[in-house]
């Protein structure tokens, strides 16, 4: 019933011909810029890490742009809609984590000092080629699975804002966007990613600021705060109470995820390995921490504004704010773009959509590039005895990138999202990063860490697959609302297993030559 009502309501939008023109001009400009970067590709170093020539201003802009995708805006707005101002705590914790990494160089500086292009390359230098192969596959599989919901979230935004209601229109629109990103990312590699990220960062920043100002003017700050108080009570402001949907344990999990996003997740680490020198790495993360704060707070605010708008509209309130419990997660994701499509005037909503597509494209090109590079550098090339030429590796990376893109189209439409999108992202990412965190910390900061211990840590990460709703249904278990407890427990287990197995099964002396 809610879906049928929403299909008709979403047709009412301010998105018109002028807005389409703005979006099309932006898309064409992005593709031309990406294709132009092709002239700077000489070898695999240029393709994967931009020749290690990225300076501070570009590094900061692109690390913010790549981590502030449209999917980020969507799942953050969903959290803002569900948790109101209490969700701001997650943004603060993310910024703190990024700042700490920027001040200490935790994990990222040692990786840059070693000159590795990918995290799995470190696994081979420190542990073994076998760990590099398995770690690379796990990293890519987890990352690609994590990326699986991007198209679904982005399609919900496009459908709601532009008034497209049929599945056919939706599939065509998202296929075109993905094809354009695939075109300039496969051709231009990391240089194209960095260059277009900078362009997209500029467009996205304008859209974020303009939209926020308009929302504040239309709804009024006092009205926003008062309405949240009426709907949520203390739970809308205090993140430490269970009624907020967060709680103390959840916030600890969010702080850990902040560190993971900054120093373990390959898409962020790629910026460190691409940096001109170690000082640039530190400055990129230190200044980037401000971006980590903004990338959450602004979408949270949009979600809160959507909550206020839905509460004031009787026909929408019955769909998005049912008397009992929450509405379906997919419907909840639509709340923010539907509200914006009605509050933003024609012309400006085109700028907003261009900014959001910029966010989507900057994330797509970074992730497509990253996972194809990992599989090429850390699986295919080692299997071939590291004898593949740069030209061959670039070609293989492009083929893999196309295969990943096809998976995204299929998975994004097939997977039944039965939880908050942010929770899905956390679970799929943790399948890899829990084991990687234990392995990187042990490998970099503990001389006695062994290959067996690393394998054990990665094995622990697989336990997080039980956090996915379809897996829980298949196993007959229910972990709803306990994802943070599961994540912290598995992380602790991975660290313990790393220590115990390293002490019980130390590496042979000859393996110690590759220690960091």
Image (cartoon, rainbow, N blue to C red):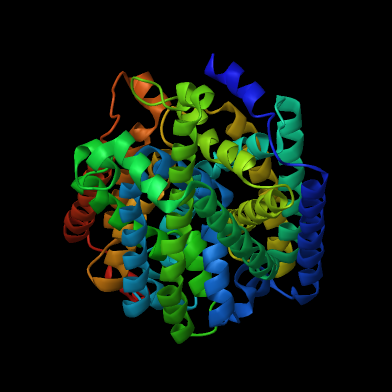
Q: x%, y% of residue 12?
A: 68, 31
In the picture, the quarter occupied by the N terminus is top right
Please say if 433 is above or below 106.
above
Horizontally, residue 421 falls left or right of residue 190, namely left
Q: Please report the residue visible at 26 percent of the width from the left and 38 percent of the height from the top.
A: 233
Q: Please report the residue visible at 43 percent of the width from the left and 49 percent of the height from the top.
A: 300
Which sits in the foreground, 202 or 339? 339
Residue 141 visible from this viewpoint: no
Residue 498 visible from this viewpoint: yes
Please say if 342 is above or below 42.
above
Q: x%, y% of residue 458?
A: 34, 49
Please say if 430 is above or below 296.
above
Number of residue marks: 0
Horizontally, residue 197 falls left or right of residue 64, namely right
Q: Please report the residue visible at 43 percent of the width from the left and 38 percent of the height from the top.
A: 424
Which sits in the foreground, 223 or 186? 223
Horizontally, residue 382 falls left or right of residue 92, namely right
Q: x%, y% of residue 284?
A: 47, 76
Q: Quadrant of residue 166?
A: top right
In the picture, the quarter occupied by the C terminus is bottom left
Please say if 241 is above or below 515.
above
Which sits in the foreground, 84 or 114? 84
Q: x%, y% of residue 36?
A: 81, 70
Which residue reaches farthest top? 1
């Amino acid at each position: 019933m809610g879906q049928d009502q929403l299909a008709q309501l979403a047709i009412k939008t301010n998105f018109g011909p002028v807005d389409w023109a703005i979006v099309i001009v932006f898309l064409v400009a992005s593709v031309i810029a990406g294709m132009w970067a092709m002239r700077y590709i000489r070898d695999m170093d240029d393709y994967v890490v931009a020749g290690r020539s990225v300076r501070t201003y570009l590094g900061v802009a692109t690390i913010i742009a790549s981590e502030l995708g449209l999917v980020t805006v969507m799942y953050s707005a969903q959290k803002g809609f569900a948790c109101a101002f209490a969700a701001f705590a997650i943004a603060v914790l993310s910024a703190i984590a990024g700042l700490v990494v920027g001040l200490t160089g935790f994990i990222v500086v040692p990786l840059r000092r070693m000159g590795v292009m990918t995290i799995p390359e470190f696994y081979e230098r420190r542990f073994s080629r076998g760990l590099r192969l398995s770690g690379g596959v796990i990293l890519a599989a987890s990352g690609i699975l994590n990326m699986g919901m991007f198209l679904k979230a982005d399609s919900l935004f496009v459908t709601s804002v532009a008034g497209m209601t049929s599945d056919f229109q939706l599939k065509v629109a998202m296929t075109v966007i993905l094809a354009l990103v695939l075109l300039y990312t496969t051709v231009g590699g990391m240089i194209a990613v960095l260059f277009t990220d900078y362009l997209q960062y500029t467009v996205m920043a304008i859209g974020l600021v303009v939209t926020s100002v308009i929302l504040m003017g239309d709804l009024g700050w006092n009205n926003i705060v008062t309405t949240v108080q009426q709907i949520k009570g203390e739970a809308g402001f205090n993140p430490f109470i269970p009624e907020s949907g967060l709680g103390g344990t959840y916030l600890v999990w969010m702080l850990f995820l902040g560190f993971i996003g900054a120093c373990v997740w390959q898409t962020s680490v790629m910026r460190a390995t691409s940096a001109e020198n170690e000082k640039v790495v530190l400055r990129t993360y230190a200044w980037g921490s401000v971006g980590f704060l903004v990338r959450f707070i602004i979408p949270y605010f949009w979600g809160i504004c959507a909550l206020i708008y839905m509460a004031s509209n009787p026909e929408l309130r019955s769909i998005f704010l049912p008397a009992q419990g929450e509405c379906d997660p997919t419907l909840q994701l639509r709340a923010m773009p539907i509200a914006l499509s009605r509050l933003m005037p024609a012309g400006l909503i085109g700028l907003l959509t261009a900014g959001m597509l910029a966010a989507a494209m900057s994330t797509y090109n970074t992730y497509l590039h990253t996972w194809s590079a990992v599989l090429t550098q850390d699986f295919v090339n080692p299997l071939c005895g590291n004898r593949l030429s740069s030209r061959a590796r670039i070609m293989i990376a492009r083929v893999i990138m196309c295969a990943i893109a096809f998976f995204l189209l299929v998975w994004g439409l097939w997977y039944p999202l039965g939880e908050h999108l942010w929770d899905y992202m956390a679970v799929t990412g943790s399948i890899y990063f829990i084991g990687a965190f234990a392995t990187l910390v042990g490998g970099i900061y503990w001389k006695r860490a062994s290959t067996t211990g690393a394998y054990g840590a990665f094995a622990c990460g697989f336990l997080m697959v039980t956090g996915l709703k379809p897996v829980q249904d298949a196993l007959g278990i229910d972990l709803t609302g306990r994802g943070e407890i599961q994540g912290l427990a598995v992380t602790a287990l991975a660290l313990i297993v790393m220590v115990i197995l390293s002490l019980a099964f130390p590496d042979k002396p000859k393996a110690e030559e590759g220690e960091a």
